[in-house]
Amino acid sequence: MNESWSNLHINQQRFQDDFAELCLIGKSGERGLSRTAFSDAHQAARAWFQQKARQAGLEVKVDAAGNHSARLECAKPDAPTLLLGSHLDSVPNGGRYDGALGVLAALEVLRCVKEHRLQLPVHLEAIDFTDEEGFLVSFLGSFAFSGKLTAQDMANPRGDRQLLEHSLQQAGLTEQGVLSAKRDPASLAGYLELHVEQGPLLEKEGVSIGVVTHISGISFYRLSYHGKAGHAGTIDMEVRRDASQGASAFTLAARQIVLEQFRGCFANVGAAHYEPGLFNVIPEKAVISLEFRAAYPQQFQQLREALLQRARQEAERFQLEMEIEYLGQRLPVEMHQTMQDAVQQSAHQLGLSAVPIIARAGHDAQALADICPTGMIFIPSVAGISHSPDEHTHWEDCLNGANVLLQAALRWIVNWDKEEKSY
Amino acid sequence: MNESWSNLHINQQRFQDDFAELCLIGKSGERGLSRTAFSDAHQAARAWFQQKARQAGLEVKVDAAGNHSARLECAKPDAPTLLLGSHLDSVPNGGRYDGALGVLAALEVLRCVKEHRLQLPVHLEAIDFTDEEGFLVSFLGSFAFSGKLTAQDMANPRGDRQLLEHSLQQAGLTEQGVLSAKRDPASLAGYLELHVEQGPLLEKEGVSIGVVTHISGISFYRLSYHGKAGHAGTIDMEVRRDASQGASAFTLAARQIVLEQFRGCFANVGAAHYEPGLFNVIPEKAVISLEFRAAYPQQFQQLREALLQRARQEAERFQLEMEIEYLGQRLPVEMHQTMQDAVQQSAHQLGLSAVPIIARAGHDAQALADICPTGMIFIPSVAGISHSPDEHTHWEDCLNGANVLLQAALRWIVNWDKEEKSY
């Protein structure tokens, strides 16, 4: 591997054409995208990815968790693999950049390296992880890949269990297979992911590249308040045990707790469902979803305690019973210093401004961080909007990101090779 | 019609056997009942009612709104009809007495009168009104019967519109038919309904019979709060326009408004639904159901104003847009004095204690009150529980209620006849 790599750029036209094609698969409305995990649109996007990889002469691979990969093998069969990737699934009615851009850029890096016949000391793999968005099981693919997925995660998914069963079957996967899809960590050199920021900071500061230093921890729960059903027009208001009251009070309190005591953290009650759910019956049960995030381990734990304690207090206040169902978490992680350095240096070498940044959203990189050197590259999101049809990133920033991914991957490999592969 | 009527009692054994049989149709769990309008169980209960009527030699009739009747014609074809009845439908997972007991007691009255060959100056009709509970369209049957149902009620039902279309078709009804099912008010002598109280007052006071003086007004709305979707882990908490906040704040406020300013009235937020309804997306839309009740016209109007004003204030407070969708109402009504007198006197003549009472729940009688002299008889509900599998009324109270219905109907007819049918 000679020095010619440091002048390589991705093929802009091909990258742009591919992105335009990919955006049509699962297109929703004018600018939106609905490509939830295992949906027809998602499967179509994965088939499209495989076709593009094959056309470029890359190997394609699907593991037992449905993770789709394109591989470029190096000359040494027993060399480890540097993974590049993200995910092709989206939230329902989400945006076009979240995930998809990172998979496409990874594919483009492999094609560039292959076209320029770079002889690398590692295999390269562009990977599309399954259900990053957690439509069925949060991080199904990258958790299975890194050996973190549990039978409990599958048995009690945050999405619909029946749909999960049906989806696995349709995709030719089995629950047992998914739970045994762990890749041998010794076979991995590292993991690097390009992603849109999904927040407003880079745009606000006018910076091109975010060098991710930490990824926030995220945890999700299902909270169920239990009261007593009854006729909504005859039971005195004073004596009702109305489950809606606990759920509503907590929904307001969760926001207040973060605003008053945990600045910079996040909490979201994204779904609510009352039972029996009728106009004229006092809600017997109110079920809400809770997700919260914090960048640092101690803060993450304190936020959890504050929220769950308040959830219980609101139950008591309205004389309700309650059930707190833990659905999973991803701990806060730090990005590997070698990856941060490679990204920072590559951005500067390309003449792009770069700043350290905390990833507030969850990313597959979080699942990989404790099994191999892991890094992330962020590019600006217009107005910080994501998980919405209004998600947008200027095309110039997408190109910059893909070029930084290419350069940072190669730079990291060179350094890793120099350091005698001892990271 | 001689004086022998005043010693008549219903057939206790037959009434009890019939009730036991009817409770099996749509049985849900140990003691509950799911017989929502047009469900298989509901249709089966109506078929059972027709069969019992035919076995008793009564005529059966189904009108264009699906209201099912058993009729006992008197000697004069042009005589008006005294209606007795209630409804066989239930809320999902509701109780066994709400509605069904009144229909069964009405049937039993007709059988008694027929067996004793009483010659009445009116036709008698035991009627089972369609969808009193409003699973699809609130008071579909009695509103159609009394000419109050509008095309708008059908086009924008409080239940699922598609299910309504399907249900009408399955039942052999048409929307146009339902909207033209009005019975000529001149053909009606009056309406009297036996029902369980669904509240705790009679039991608390140890009284057997409630003489209903007023029926509370009830109104329903669908409230939709509109914010902005976005990634729940990246958009700053300070700038979110989270629809869940407006909906939750109003849900708490509705209860407080009634407790603090409208004692004796009721408000219920029975259902909530967030969109897109995902863990990791800020709710863009939060839709809740609102139902409120008050016994007197002015109070009803003031409660409406207070609730809807607050609903709008909560939208403003959280920088949300909102939509208030009016879904219908039943105005507060007064029971006809002649009916109140007949019920009160019959109870005393049977040696039963009786007190005036306000009907807090909605009843088909509400739809009839402005087209013919209308009355209601209440019997105690254990612990006031209703719309729940725990709904219960002691069997002795059921028997008392049925005997008061029989006696009050006959007493009212005698008085009406004496007063030269001039009510």
Image (cartoon, coloured by chain):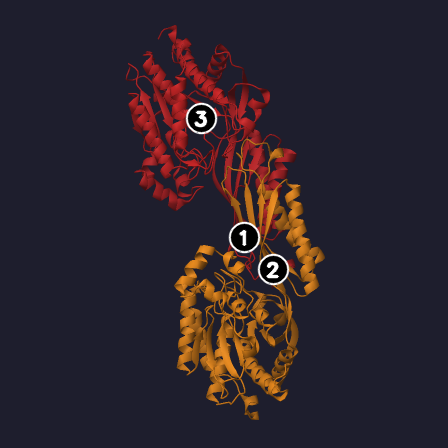
Chain colours: A red, B orange
Q: Residue at x 66, y 74 (%)?
A: B356
Mark yes or no: residue B114 visible.
yes
The furthest residue to the top: A3
Neighbor class of circle 2 (other Cα within 10 Å; few <14, some 14-19, many 20+) is: some
| Image position of A12 with respect to A87: above or below | above
Residue B54 position, x and y percent, is 40, 80
Q: Nearer the viewer, mark 1 or mark 2?
A: 2
* Amino acid at circle 3: Ala
Q: Quadrant of the C terminus of chain A?
A: top left
Q: Residue at x 30, y 21 (%)?
A: A56
In three-dimensional space, the C-alpha distance between marks 1 and 2, rounded to whole angstroms, equals: 15 Å
Residue at mark 2: chain: B
* Amino acid at circle 1: Ala
Q: Residue at x 48, y 80 (%)?
A: B108
Residue B307 vs residue B21, the one in the foreground: B307
Q: Secondary structure at mark 2?
A: strand
- Numbered mark located on residue B94 in the image: none
Q: Secondary structure at mark 3?
A: helix
Mark yes or no: residue B31 visible.
no
* Amino acid at circle 2: Ser
Neighbor class of circle 3 (other Cα within 10 Å; few <14, some 14-19, many 20+) is: many
Q: Which residue is mark 2?
A: B219
Q: Which residue is mark 1?
A: B271
Q: Quadrant of residue A149?
A: top left
